Image (cartoon, rainbow, N blue to C red):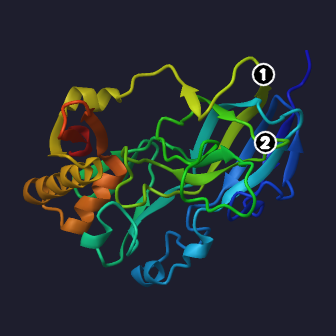
Amino acid sequence: MATIPSFHVTRSERRIGWDRTAAPALVVPSGAELTFDVIDSSGGQLTDTSTLQDVANIDFAQVDPFHGPVFVEGAHPGDILHVDLLEFMPKGYGWTANMPGFGLLADEFPEPWFHVWELGPKRAQFVKGISVPIEPFCGVIGVARDEPGNLDVIPPRRTGGNMDSKQLRAGTTLYLPVEVEGALFGLGDTHAAQGDGEVCGNAIEAPMDVTLRLSVRRDFTLETPEYEFVRPLERASAAEAGYYVTTGIGPDLLEATRDAIRHMIDKLERSHGLDRYEAYALCSTAVDLKISEVVDQPNWVVAAFLPRDLFA
């Protein structure tokens, strides 16, 4: 039986921006297994010893680096890159910040805010009586677009990138449409936990080791990323403890989303004693947004789900 080749991508092998002309950090055959030593989304600017002043001084030009790119032999435009996500190993700490000018409610949260999380084996402590289960994944994962120039990492694209999909965890298989020779795969922005929506602009941002397998497929085509997994959509402890749900209702889907989070922040303030910045951060790291309906015009419904298993 042939040995599966294995490769390592160091934290120094990273870049800012997707570029179809970028020299690859690594060239691997289809079927290769890789381990990435992933730096946090600040590019190392924020650590477990950082302060609020460090958040205020952050250089956004260095934010959201991705590791790679990795050239996959045999990957051609029109192919599919099959990504088996195998293991995520956080390195003991993470952080969440409010960065002025960024986030769903940026106009309502103008001040910097910062929290360092100590990551235990299963949970991360927030404040006394509140902790968040650790469910690590990659916020940024994708391949290069066939477009000229160095493309900003922040917006996701049809070839992936900054999708912030918390289901891209160990055990998930991701399929990415290839647009350039070798695919030029990269990943970064690893999160120890996140609520669907990542509303303050940060999850529990955490450096970690990520292991995966890359294979080339030609038996189907895609327009945008797709993925599959076999596990419940909700963790058992959340299902058992239940949820508190707030809603936003109106003719503008984005404003309905903002309302759902505003109402959840109010709930966390009055029922759990959090200040507004703490509540906003907890929404970003643990509250799941869902579109409840988009057919009953002229108003749409967005719901925010707060899992009660966060609370002691």
Residue 183 image label: 2
The residue lying at 24 percent from left, 30 percent from top is 295
**Going by the image, does 284 lie left or right of 265?**
right
Q: How many labels does the image show?
A: 2
Up-down relation of residue 226 to residue 132 (above or below) = above
Q: Can you see residue 307?
A: no
Residue 297 coordinates in the image, percent (x, y): 19, 35
- The image quadrant where one finds the C terminus is top left
Q: Can you see residue 256?
A: yes
The kind of secondary structure element at disc 1 is loop
**Going by the image, does 283 lie left or right of 13?**
left
Say which amino acid is labelled 2.
Ala
**Going by the image, does 207 lie left or right of 112?**
right
The residue lying at 44 percent from left, 49 percent from top is 120
Contact between marks 1 and 2 (CB within 8 A): the answer is: no
Residue named by callout 1? 218
The residue lying at 32 percent from left, 26 percent from top is 236
| Identity of the residue furthest to the front in this view | 298
Q: Distance between the residues labelled 1 and 2?
A: 13 Å
Residues 298 and 285: in front is 298
Which comes before the other along the chain, label 1 or label 2?
A: 2
Residue 96, image quadrant: bottom left
Residue 200, image quadrant: bottom left
Residues 156 and 67: in front is 156
Up-down relation of residue 271 to residue 98 (above or below) = above
| Identity of the residue furthest to the right in this view | 2
Residue count near mark 1 (Cα–Cα under 10 Å), binned few <14, some 14–19, many ≥20: few
Say which amino acid is labelled 1.
Arg
Residues 115 and 101: in front is 101
